[in-house]
Image: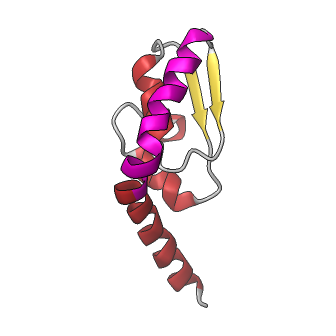
Amino acid sequence: MSNDKVAAFAGTLAEFYDRYLVPLMFAPYAEVVADRAKVLLPRCVLETAAGTGVATEALARILPTDVTITATNLNEPMIERGKVKPGIACPADR
């Protein structure tokens, strides 16, 4: 399979994931995670396997603005899709 087809599929997968799977499977749990994290009074948060950023978004909404949130994912199209969400800013993009 050519790299173009892999990249196109990954982009489509990120859109599908964000549009259908996030609301169905991940959004309710993102709020629970953010609520539990808030109780810990973190100064920084490292989120691994962030997908398109549903938990990152919830954390950014509920935690104080001085908390540093670092979100990672192995799939670049997922990261790119998450970058455009409200409350999510990438230091490299500033």
**Residue at 56%, 19% in the rendered image:** 36
**Residue at 52%, 83% in the rendered image:** 4
Query: Which quarter of the figure has residue 41?
Result: top right
57 is within the stretch colored magenta: no
> What span is in magenta?
21-40
**Residue at 42%, 71% in the rendered image:** 12
Would you say 94 lies left or right of 48 here?
A: left
Q: Pinpoint residue 81: horizontal percent, then vertical percent.
A: 42, 53
22 is within the stretch colored magenta: yes
Q: Pinpoint residue 47: horizontal percent, then vertical percent.
A: 63, 35
| Residue 19 visible somewhere in the drawing | yes
Instruction: Relative to 10, say whether 71 is above or below.
Output: above
Q: Quadrant of the N terminus?
A: bottom right
**Residue at 50%, 61% in the rendered image:** 77
Instruction: Relative to 65, say whether 8 is above or below.
Output: below
Instruction: Relative to 28, say whether 34 is above or below.
Output: above
Q: Residue furthest bottom?
A: 1
Query: Which quarter of the figure has residue 94?
Result: top left
**Main SS category, magenta section:** helix
